[in-house]
Amino acid sequence: MNKDCPTQDNLSKFLSGEISANERDTFELHLAECADCRSNLALMFSEKADVENFVAPNSLKEKAKNLPEKSKGNSASFFSFDWLKTNRLQVGFASILLSCFALAGIYFLQNQTSQSSEDVLRNGTSNKTSIQLLFPEDNKSLSSEKVEFRWSQLPNVKNYTLILSDEKGDIIKEISSDKTNIETSISELGLAKNKRCFWHVKAKFMDGTISESESRKILVVAN
């Protein structure tokens, strides 16, 4: 109880009906807002009558209904987690959605990081560091013993590596060069006649990073 609360004597007079109509209105308004006084009044009343049979005056009920909610009371209700308890289904659903978005973001970032440049370039994805194969064309038939491979030049490249592989993906030959072309022969490459093989070029940059071109097919038909 605080200094604005009525005394025990005044509460007793309120119960006994020994106060004026104006005083009763003031008491009822105070009781509607003060839990301590209501508890004290109920305790005093229980000493005189069965508290279960106590019925609050209609005027008190109406005034209590019309009282505006205090911001302090609303704040206390929020921080006591009443809002969270009554909305636990919405909160749980929101948490699940946030978790799904987080997992999807992590998966996307990991997938982007782990994807090698070889996969990107071999699928024909072009970017500023991709190597463009110039000759031989895709599905080109090599009818001469001599053969030349050419590709585009990239800046800041330390060296290029020409890589030939069979249909199983096993490497047949690798030749490194600081130029953008290599002249060689079918026999030197060890390519089998009437067999398809694949060629692509790998570039190693000055900073140690690597970029690989797409693959092209060639068919050896030379005598």
Image (cartoon, grey):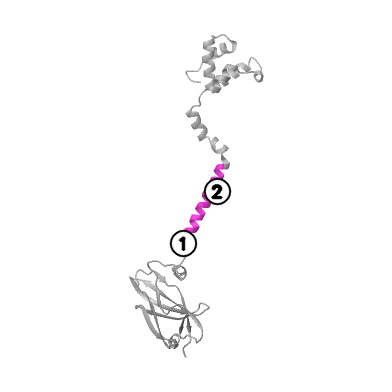
Judging by the rendered image, the residue that carries numbered circle 1 is: 112
Label 1 environment density (alpha carbons within 10 Å; few <14, some 14–19, many ≥20): few
Magenta range is: 90-110
Measuring from the top left, give residue 118's x and y in whole percent.
45, 70
For the stretch drawn in magenta, the main secondary structure is helix
Which amino acid does the dot numbered 1 rest on?
Gln
Q: Classify mark 2: helix, strand or loop.
A: helix
Going by the numbered disc 2, the residue's amino acid type is: Ile
Residue at the (53%, 49%) spot, across then down: 97
Q: CA distance from mark 2 to mark 1?
A: 24 Å
- Relative placement, left or right, of 49 versus 96 is right
Asked which secondary structure carries label 1, the reply is helix
182 in magenta:
no
Q: Residue at x 57, y 37 (%)?
A: 86
> On screen, 75 above or below 216?
above
Residue bearing mark 2 = 96
Answer above or below: position of 113 versus 15: below
